[in-house]
Image (cartoon, rainbow, N blue to C red):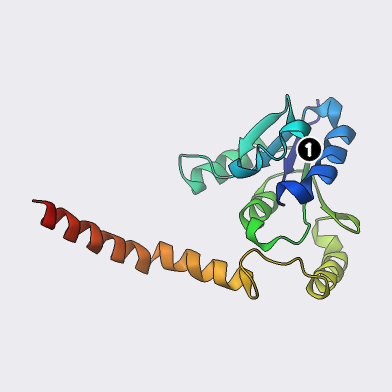
Amino acid sequence: MTTVRVFASAPAAAAREPLAAILREHAGAAPIVYLRDRDRSGLAAVLEGRDLRSDKPGGGRLAFVRALRAEGAELAVALWLGHDEYWPAKALFLLARAKRKVAVTERGTLEVRLSSVPALLAHATWRRKHRVPSPYGRGGLLRALLRWAYRATLGRVIGALVTAVRYSLSR
């Protein structure tokens, strides 16, 4: 049986139709779908009875990526619909081991491999001109990355200090 992994890297409203088409096309392969937990309810009708997995499971990111790469697949499919906040799912798609990788865009499908670099660059150029509004506003991806960097570094230090002060005051 063909192993297919689908990475739903778009909000539920935008992913519903393309995801349904992908699942219909690969219905005999019993695809494994990776998606955000908050998008499950919005895609419940499309994903009923499917093997669903979170794109951020417990156990650590590195262990998850190692397990994903160890399993491998014949085909990996991702939705590249221009939503910047879904970069972790897109990164998972790129890191996944698969014999063939396909990205579904608004304009069709793209093979993701070294020989398709011109097509990928053409899509990146088109995407730059036809941006999807970010929920973070103008400069959305940059702000999201800065927020992540703050939480991963200075935010932890400040959080530890606040926790220490609260603990000392509660005694």
Residue 57 left/right relative to 70 = left
Q: At which x and y percent is residue 111?
A: 85, 54
Can residue 3 be seen in the rendering of this structure?
A: no
Given residues 41 and 131, the one toward you in this image is: 41
Q: Secondary structure at mark 1?
A: loop
| Quadrant assignment, res 35 | top right
Q: Is residue 123 left or right of residue 45?
A: right
Three-letter residue code for mark 1: Glu
Residue indicated by mark 1: 74
Residue 119 falls in image quadrant: bottom right
Residue 39 placement (x, y as % from top left): 65, 43
Q: Is residue 88 left or right of residue 116?
A: left
Q: Position of residue 26 (x, y in %)?
A: 85, 33
Residue 102 place in picture, x, y as percent: 82, 50
- Residue 43 appears in the picture as rendered: yes
Q: Residue at x 91, y 59 (%)?
A: 107
